[in-house]
Image (cartoon, grey):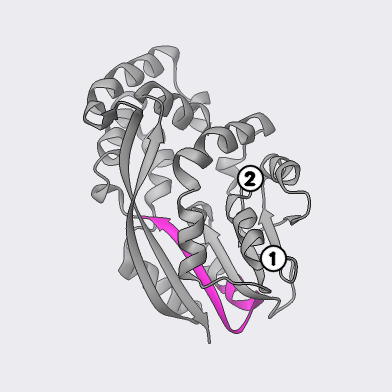
Amino acid sequence: MTETFQISPEQAEMYEAKYVPAIFAQWAPLLLDAAHVTTGQRVLDVACGTGILARSAADRVGPSGAVTGLDLNEGMLTVARRLAPDVEWRHGDAADLPFEPDSYDAVLCQSGLMFFPDPDQTLREMRRVCRPGGTVGVQVYASLGSQPAYGPWVELVARHAGPEATRLLSTYWAHGDLDELGRRFDTAGLVVEDVHTRLGTVRWASADEMVQVEIEGSPLIDRISDAQYTAIRNESRELLGEYRTDTGLQAPIGAHLVIARQR
């Protein structure tokens, strides 16, 4: 994660308790399936966060395999180590991976590529540490303009919180253009073999919870006033009303899974 998104251990705990079940957990098995991760493989999870993908990969590869999770954020790693002490957790920069060439059968990144200052360098590093013929795979979110719930919601937040909020919240959707993403893989020396576009579901208890977690779990909370926060929360209830169900808020979210081979 970039310096902009460095978070405290307390925010990392919120990330694991709220973001992971609401958004991220659903993508882990899909990315592992797309990358054909199986028993005995060596897997690297780049920008692992609190480790949902790495933990899921460890279940797939079993005791004959090995999984490493790497993140630049110590707060995230503190939570990851608590949840899965048997996984190898490493602090490090995705643009300068602290591993030898050809170290892994699969090098994956879930919901992380958008946070890197130099995504092209990150893809080159992912290729370097992947064995010849191995798999490099990423999951990114589709472009904001194609997001039926989050697109209008980011516009709402931006109206109240200004361009800084737009910049922070737009980061998540920065690699939604598949043509551009394909060029990045090609430049990194990777051959794209499969692209899957999936529509997932974000699940919150309510619109209020979504606003709380999305804002308080990001640096945006330190950049807006109480009045701005209240206005965003109140208007979000109406904006997201069509996604209310008997069990809470269920909003659509689109993502791409891109799978490539090391040349």
- 90 w.r.t. 4: above or below: below
Pointer 2 or 1: first along the chain: 2
Which mark is drawn over residue 172? none
Magenta residues, dominant SS class: strand
Give the residue displayed 62% in from the left and 40% down from the top.
Answer: 6
Q: Amino acid type of disc 2?
A: Thr
Q: CA distance from mark 2 to mark 1?
A: 20 Å
Task: Tell me where residue 231 sits by quadrant.
Answer: top left
Magenta stretch holds residue 64:
no
Task: Return the residue nearer the eye: 118 or 140.
Answer: 140
**Is any atom of residue 206 visible in this view?**
yes
Q: Is residue 68 left or right of residue 185?
A: right
- 130 w.r.t. 246: above or below: below
Q: Position of residue 79 (x, y in %)?
A: 70, 40
Q: Magenta residues?
A: 124-141
Which mark is drawn over residue 50? 2
- 107 w.r.t. 249: above or below: below
Give the residue displayed 35% in from the left and 19% down from the top.
Answer: 233
